Amino acid sequence: MVKTLDFKPKMFSAIRNYNKKTFLADLMAGIIVGIVALPLAIAFGIASGVSPEKGIITAIVAGLMISLFGGSKVQIGGPTGAFIVIVYGIIQQYGMQGLTIATLMAGVFLILLGVLRLGTIIKYIPYPIVVGFTSGIAVTIFTTQIKDLLGMQMEVVPSDFIEKWIAYFGNIGNIDCWSAVMGIASVVIIAAWPMLARVFRLSPLRSLPGSLVAIIVITVIALLLKQYAGVTTIETIGDRFSINSQLPGAVVPDLSWETIKRLVGPAVTIAVLGAIESLLSATVADGVIGDHHNSNTELIGQGIANIASPLFGGIPATGAIARTMTNINNGGRTPVAGIIHAAVLLLIFLFLMPLAQYIPMACLAGVLVVVAYGMSGWRSFLAMLRNPKSDITVLLLTFFLTIIFDLTIAIEFGLICACLLFMRRMAETTDVHAILNEIDLNEDADMERGNLEHLTIPKDVEVYEINGPYFFGAGNRFEDIMARYGKHPKVRIIRMRKVPFIDSTGLHNLENMCLMSQKEGVTVVLSGVNEKVETVLKRNNFQRIIGEENICNHIDLALARAKEIITL
């Protein structure tokens, strides 16, 4: 039966019983989230290698689409720190045109993930991978901001992580003291703002984000220093970019098959990371508001957002945990709050954007340093180091690949490593052992035991038991056990009462074992085969190899068959 499309935007269900009280709560939350998103959108845009207005355009367009078509009531979408490294790398290698095409392709991939109902599967990406590349991204973001944070006079900043730090240490003497003070002061203000607002009883201002307070304060100080102290070394956004406050029209990029093939890798990375971050944010939000988001609808909404954003010159977007939590904490309970947040950003963009040219680059770097610290999840990282070695291996591999190479490689190798470790663990769940001398009937459920407590295994009969799925890895372990205990008996009973299923690899190994046993003059009898496994065996004509009479329902029939074979 063909499944229907799982696309049910929360916006449509939320407005059915909408009222004035809910609107006022959403209005206040939307205004506050819009103000919170402003400095982050500018900072993420610049750090990604694009102009500041592109970050705000992304927050406006993608934020609106995610609220309209997403599967969460309170999700706030826009540019996030996780995409900085990816976007910057794509622009360096493929240019802005390449980023636009890669983002469009990522949007299509996200929609396909939702249409194919893979939203729940994305949630099962191993936690060590998520922690590893999130922490790696945080370290990379911090590294990219050192130049602007300290006002280093460097013509070229190497792209390689290690070379970048070597260059920084080589240019310590080129630090601009005023810029460094502005940058460090920004970090201090952001970190201390909640405490300062509480100590000085600035209750009406407590809802303002520390990042916005830092930008306002540091920008004013920088202007005063330039006007009255003659300090001209503090670089601002206007020194590096030309500010444009006009909304761009939609532009469809030129697409070619060759370009699409080259950008499949970056597009998949954007899609996977966007899916993970948006669903993680939606899941966290569910726990706070007591709701359940629709994963597939959320992915489709994210896909629509990532198709719309680049058409207007924006960059990749996803659900933002910090802005989503700000929305919840300020009373937002429906997607209307997200729409209002986009409208607030639009008004700021149209009427106040020219003022952004006075913001010091060191201040924005300070904002991103704090973002990087929040992303690092260092407590989770350290806690993961107490886990099994396999988890630690995946964690460290993903982390170091992220900071030394790039996120695309990190995700690919991390997923491959996690899959291999998963297969190994699954193989280890299957236990194969030999039963010597007698069978304890008190532990058996597949036979008619009567008043017996033990059942003696006849001479010239070996009994082996498989406990768990019989698939890759189990066959080799079975051969090892047989080599250790086997003495070429006349009958070899394989108990399969605890085998829930058998795959093609297990079936192949079982066939080889039976054929090898026949060459040695040993008859194989299967015991306790359940209906599901028996169906697989019959479908592959397994009874032709050992005979249908040698496939028994329980152990007493198998032993009776073994005695019959011995007496022949």
Image (cartoon, helix red, strand yellow):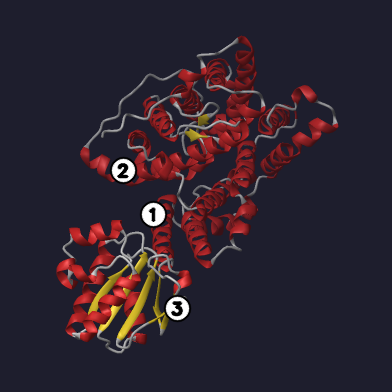
Secondary structure state at the residue bearing disc 2: loop
- For the point 22% across and 81% down, the residue is 565
Per the model, the C-alpha gap separating discs 1 and 2 is 15 Å
Q: Report which quarter residue 42 is drawn in.
A: top right
Count neighbours of disc 1 (C-alpha within 10 A) and say few if under 14, some if 14 to 19, many if 20 or more: some
SS at badge 3 = strand
The answer to whether mark 2 and mark 3 are in CB contact below 8 A is no
Looking at this view, name the residue that lies furthest to the top: 20
Q: Where is residue 446 in the image (x, y as percent from the top left)?
A: 38, 65
Name the amino acid, label 3: His
Q: Distance between the residues labelled 1 and 3?
A: 53 Å
Q: Choose the circle earlier in sequence order: 1 or 3.
A: 1
Q: Please tell me whether residue 548 is drawn above or below residue 301 in the rendered image.
A: below
Is residue 468 depicted above or below 481 in this figure? above
Disc 3 marks which residue? Answer: 454
> Relative to 186, is 535 on the left or the right?
left
Residue occupying image coordinates x 51% and y 57%: 399
Dot 2: few (<14), some (14–19), or many (≥20) neighbours within 10 Å?
some
- Residue, disc 1: 412
**Amino acid beneath label 1:** Glu
Is the residue under label 2 in contact with that under label 1 (CB below 8 Å)?
A: no
Foreground mark, 1 or 3?
Answer: 3
Please identify the quadrant where the C terminus is shown.
bottom left
Earlier in the chain: of badge 1 and badge 2, it is 2
Note whether 132 is above or below 250 in the view shown.
Answer: below
Q: Which of marks 2 and 3 is nearer the N terminus?
A: 2
Amino acid marked by disc 2: Leu
Residue topped by disc 2 = 263
Q: What residue is drawn where x is 39% and y is 58%? A: 419
